[in-house]
Image (cartoon, rainbow, N blue to C red):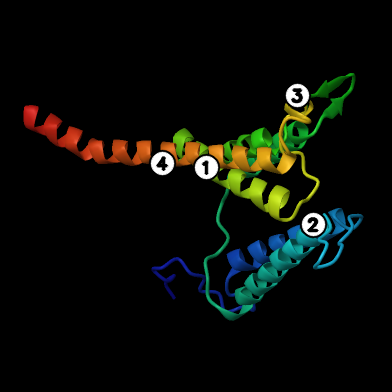
Amino acid sequence: MDAPLDGTSSRRGPVRAPQSLVAGLGLIGLGLFGIWAGSDLDYGSLRVIGPGLMPFWLSVGVGLCGLALAISGFTHDGAPLQAFTLRGPVVITLAIIAFAVTIRPFAIGGITTPGLGLIVAGPLAIIIAGYAGTEARFLELLTLALFLTAGCMLLFGDMLNLPIPIFPTAVVQAMTGVLPARTMLRIAAGALALAGLGLLLVQRRSSRREPIEVARHSLTT
């Protein structure tokens, strides 16, 4: 019997979509790891949300999505396992490490890295992680990083009031007593969002000019 043209699995065994099954098991493992890693954090309550409440439910959600995906591997036809390169896992791991060593001061032997806060560690990790794919473009990644970091600053630092370092340690020390922390956070998040919007407009203009320049070049040649 020939293989289906759409690339789905034609096996008659219990596993009908090996790729979905493996991906689901991976998400389940990630969710369990998140629950274990945040088990020592205080969950708080719905009125006073603790630092462990959102990571816990996020991990639960990831695990449930993985469970649904794994079950679909037995109930729906899907793609078989495909070959993969190490570029993605290696780059994502580097992005996580970069975030961990830059958001807070991190001691490595006798050297301690300066704490740069989420405003620097967030975009850095997003840009590095974006290069896990082969079609990464720096300006697009930078635009995404600015918008996502601004959103995370407002969500975690302003709305949820979680104890996450937002600014570099030197900036916090210099601005203490000058501006309220929440006001400074909102101003910085707005600045990041405006910068991201500016980059987005620049990219749209350049994308509109490309067809015109191609047409002019074809006419001159």
Q: Which mark is residue 34?
A: 2
Q: Which of marks 2 and 3 is nearer the N terminus?
A: 2
Q: Which amino acid does label 2 sit on?
A: Gly
Query: Residue placed at 14% from the left, 30% from the top?
Result: 217
The location of residue 212, given as percent across then percent down, is: 18, 37
Quadrant placement of the N terminus: bottom left
Kindly state the secondary structure of the residue where label 4 is placed: helix
Q: Tell me how far mark 1 sits from mark 3, CA to CA.
A: 24 Å
Q: What residue type is labelled 4?
A: Leu
Q: Tell me how far mark 4 sits from mark 1, CA to CA.
A: 10 Å
Q: Can residue 115 be seen in this view?
A: no
Query: Residue placed at 30% from the left, 36% from the top?
Result: 206
Q: Earlier in the sequence, mark 2 or mark 4?
A: 2
Q: Which mark is residue 193?
A: 1
Q: Which amino acid does label 3 sit on?
A: Ala
Q: Which of marks 1 and 3 is nearer the N terminus?
A: 3
Answer few, some or many: residues within 10 Å of disc 3's Cα (few below 14, many 20 plus, some between 14 and 19): few
Q: Can residue 192 be seen in this view?
A: yes
Q: Residue furthest front?
A: 178
Answer few, some or many: residues within 10 Å of disc 4's Cα (few below 14, many 20 plus, some between 14 and 19): some
On screen, 170 above or below 46? above
Q: Residue 174 carries which label?
A: 3
Q: Earlier in the sequence, mark 1 or mark 2?
A: 2
Position of 205 with respect to 113 (left or right) is: left
Kindly state the secondary structure of the residue where label 2 is placed: helix
Viewer-nearest of labels 2 and 4? 4
Q: Mark 4 points at which residue?
A: 200
Viewer-nearest of labels 2 and 3? 3
Query: Residue placed at 7% from the left, 32% from the top?
Result: 219
Query: Residue placed at 78% from the left, 31% from the top?
Result: 177
Quadrant placement of the C terminus: top left
Q: In which quarter of the image is residue 189?
A: top right
